[in-house]
Amino acid sequence: MNSPTELHTDWSAAAITERRNTYYAASQSRFVPFQEPIIFKRGSMQYLWDVDDRKFTDLLGMNVCISVGHSHPRVVAAAVQQAQELTHCTTMFYHPAPAHLAEELAATLPNSSQWVVHFTNSGAEAIDLAMTMARGYTGNLDLLALRTAYHGPTSAAQSVTGIASWRHSGLPGNVAFVADPNQYRGIFGEGTDAYLDEIDRTIATATSGRIAGMLIESIQGYGGVVEMPEGYLAGAAERVRAAGGLYIADEVQSGFGRTGDHYWGFQAHDVVPDIIVCAKGMGNGFPIAAVISKREVAAPMAEKFMFHTYGANPTSCAAARAVLQVIEDEKLQDNSRQVGAALLERLNDLQIRYDSIGDVRGRGLMLAIELVKDRNTKEPDKAVAAAVFEKCREQGLILSKSGPSQSCLRMVPPMCLDMSDVDAVGDGLDAAFASL
Ligand SMILES: Cc1ncc(COP(=O)(O)O)c(C=O)c1O
């Protein structure tokens, strides 16, 4: 048998670029954040090393997938052990790993016995399934979503994504968008009531009056770490349910303890969703996602088949089981709260010193700074965000340019980010701003 090292692999930037340019579809090559490509060779916990062995702190958590640390030894060991025994087993056949994981996920939720789990491969597939489930259960077609939401790349997930740069042509319809209750730059200003009234108005004018549900990220991720204000989630759920719909919580970025105070983002709001979508950090880099729904919401789907070939893949499930254990054993939710608070303090300090920082926000290890041309007009400053982003690379920091205008620098590192990293991150950001 060939060992992986026998696969011919050319690590040079020129060769990778040439192969990508020749063989990648245009749809896969556009989303490249840095001006010059970056080639990562290895990772350990919150750190990455590039092909020249330069060390970086991964404040992006490889797109929020790395929850407990790059190549976390316990997660890798669990996956390797399972892969060596039986790499794949579809849900047509019985295997204990996914069944255990379903039970363990349900146990993270209030009244655990009311929840059931359907595993998929990716967050977008899970969003897609949640939409099908909500439409089937309610018998209604129309869905609501927020204008700066990102829910994924499948056609269905794009159709509920409000950011134009992620929406391609030919998307399915029956989706109405409502204004984000963004407390920094929302169209109705601060507060919650006007945004809730907008939900009622939208149901009355842009839908049939009866809806299947509303998808909401408890804290918007790609939208620029936009927190739902107090009272919004409960108020939205109430209005949506009154119109016959379900409250679908997209916890793809905000779940698994990242927000520090709670395991799930919605738990900060005293409301329980009907459907929860999770992915990314669930597998710490292994592809796995899930729709967790109230038992009765999933029940009508028993009338037909629904099969995701890799959905309950035991290797990914073994990894995810280890992730849940590591979050608990290593107290990563607590760590997110404490380290996130210390990092937030450094970001607030930067805002005092750099006028281009219009807003600093977030909770736990889900933070962002928003760059503006003018603090009064709040005009987004994409150019400065891009410049700081590039300078951060020189400081050994990987961040994310986010938000509909790409004017936010988002920080969603592995939850093992340490207090000892906070100064390095704060100093690196400081140096990046100072060098502009
Ligand atoms: C909030 C949210 N929902 C859904 C998705 C889609 O997940 P995936 O990329 O695994 O399909 C993403 C991905 O970035 C996301 O951030």
Image (spheres, rainbow, N blue to C red):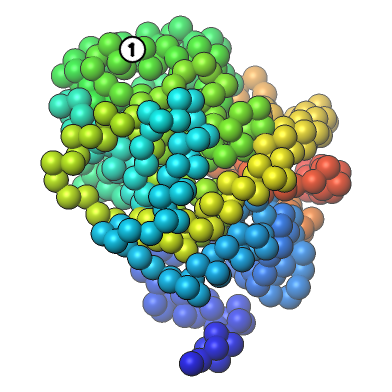
x and y percent of residue 141 in the render?
18, 29
Residue at x 43% of width, y 70% of height: 87
Is 17 positioned to the left or the right of 356 in the image? left
Looking at the image, is 436 positioned above or below residue 31?
above
Is residue 366 in view from this perspective?
Answer: no
Is 171 positioned to the left or the right of 195 in the image? left
x and y percent of residue 156 in the render?
27, 43
Which quadrant holds residue 423? top right
x and y percent of residue 207 in the render?
20, 20
Of 232 and 85, the residue lying toward us: 85
Total marks drawn?
1
Q: Which residue is mark 1?
A: 239
Which quadrant holds residue 40? bottom right
Is residue 1 in view from this perspective?
Answer: yes
Residue at x 47% of width, y 80% of height: 19
Of 41 and 268, the residue lying toward us: 268
Residue at x 38% of width, y 33% of height: 115
x and y percent of residue 203 in the render?
26, 16
Of 129 and 168, the residue lying toward us: 129
Of 217 and 262, the residue lying toward us: 262
Looking at the image, is 237 positioned above or below residue 194?
below
Looking at the rendered structure, the secondary structure element under dot 1 is helix
Looking at the image, is 86 positioned above or below residue 288?
below
Tell me if mark 1 has few (under 14), some (14-19) or many (20+) residues whose alpha carbon lies within 10 angstroms of its own.
many
Q: Which amino acid is tagged 1? A: Arg
Distance from mark 1 CB to nearest ligand 1 atom below 8 Å: no
Is 390 positioned to the left or the right of 318 in the image? right
Residue at x 14% of width, y 45% of height: 304
